[in-house]
Amino acid sequence: MTRLERVRAMYVPAVREPRRETDVRALLAAAPVVLAPMEDVSDAAFRRVCRTAGRLPGDGERSPIACVTEFVHVDQILAGSKIALRKLALASEDGPTAAQIYGADPARLLAAARIAEAAEPTWLDINCGCWVPRIAGKGAGAGWLRNPDAMVAMARDVVAAVSLPVTVKTRIGWDTTQLPILDLVRRLEDVGVAAITIHCRTAVSGHSGAADWTWAARAREAVAIPIIVNGDVRTGEDVVRALAETGCAAAMIGRGAIDHPWAFREARALLAGIAIAPPTIAERCAIYAAAVTHNVALRGERVGVPVSRRYLRLLGPIADAIRTPLFAAVRLDEVLAVLDVFLGETRRKHAPASNEACPDPRSKSTTAVTVASTASSA
């Protein structure tokens, strides 16, 4: 038995399951704010951060925040690499979550899709939008936009090969001379793609310039399947405006979530017409602590503690003051001790029971830190 056969035997059922009738439109109606796939960001720990920060009063045990994994290269999946297995490992509470795969070879994409399906994501997403030269330059990601015919054929084959709904994340075109998106969404719908996320920039533009949401609006009018608008959607207000201007089924938040995952809660509150308080200092520290703890559980202390330093900006107005002692910590208990000391054990024990902002140890005034916390959420 070859290595590939062993991987398939481990992760793919021997008998193909019937197609799972997940209603992507209904899923997005319940979860119209989606976490974007971001390499080295949207891992299991950060997905939990966003779902925790995105909770509203009255939510059940599972927060209705849809997420997409970090993208996983088909070669890593087919090789059964530790990186692929980590990215595709989905706990029972980690949903709704899509697994995103990418590659330039249609046959290998198809084979990897069958393996990724066994991880039981809610749906499978194909990355046809990553503009980074080392990805797109080799024909993967946004490189598919150079050959729309090949992209459609690849999507058709993947849809036919798996029982999960298949979606595609792409851009409006390779450059301003090639903007095939309106024809492309129709053709992808015709081959069975269940939904399409459109980053409203070209591949060549990367993240520069303003995203043009009118393309998402026009795509939404061209097809019956859900369109998810992406690009320059950073805040709760952006989500509401993007949905209002485009009529799309959902909006996808990317880089804005890194600094402020509470954007999910704020967007949901605005859509529901309810008022919510900004995150308190205590809430920021609690989410940071939970993220580090979860990363340690997933990766071990030696890797989990330092990799969690990427979350520093979750701490908002206290991030600069706590950076040095926090980054000096190498064990989980040291990280938690730094957070405890910074908040102040006595202050926490004698804090009012209400959800008011926890005082900043740098300030003599509780009012001052409340204002700072509010400003950080704007």
Image: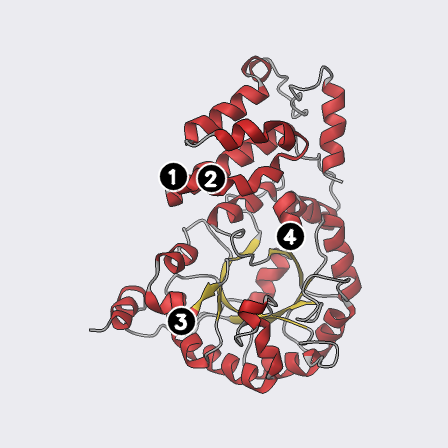
The tag earlier along the polypeptide, 4 or 3, is 3
Residue 127 is at least partly visible in this image:
no
Query: Between marks 4 and 3, how big is the CA–CA gap?
Result: 27 Å
Identify which amino acid the numbered label 1 is placed on. Arg
Work out whether 246 lies above or below 296: below
Secondary structure state at the residue bearing disc 4: loop
Identify which amino acid the numbered label 3 is placed on. Ala
Identify which amino acid the numbered label 4 is placed on. Arg
Q: Name the residue under label 3.
A: 112
The tag earlier along the polypeptide, 2 or 4, is 4
> Is residue 102 shown left or right of residue 217?
left
User: Which mark is drawn over residue 122?
Assistant: none
Count residues near mark 1 (Cα–Cα under 10 Å), then give few for <14, some for 14-19, many for 20+.
Answer: few
Count residues near mark 3 (Cα–Cα under 10 Å), then give few for <14, some for 14-19, many for 20+.
Answer: many
Closer to the camera in the image, 182 or 209: 209
Which x, y percent locates residue 54?
61, 44
Query: Between marks 2 and 1, how big is the CA–CA gap?
Result: 7 Å
The tag earlier along the polypeptide, 3 or 2, is 3
Closer to the camera in the image, 56 or 325: 325
Query: Between marks 1 and 4, how big is the CA–CA gap?
Result: 26 Å
The tag earlier along the polypeptide, 3 or 1, is 3
Disc 2 to disc 1: CB gap under 8 Å: yes
Q: Mark 2 points at which residue?
A: 306
Q: Mark 4 points at which residue?
A: 255
Q: Mark 1 points at which residue?
A: 302
Count residues near mark 2 (Cα–Cα under 10 Å), then give few for <14, some for 14-19, many for 20+.
Answer: some
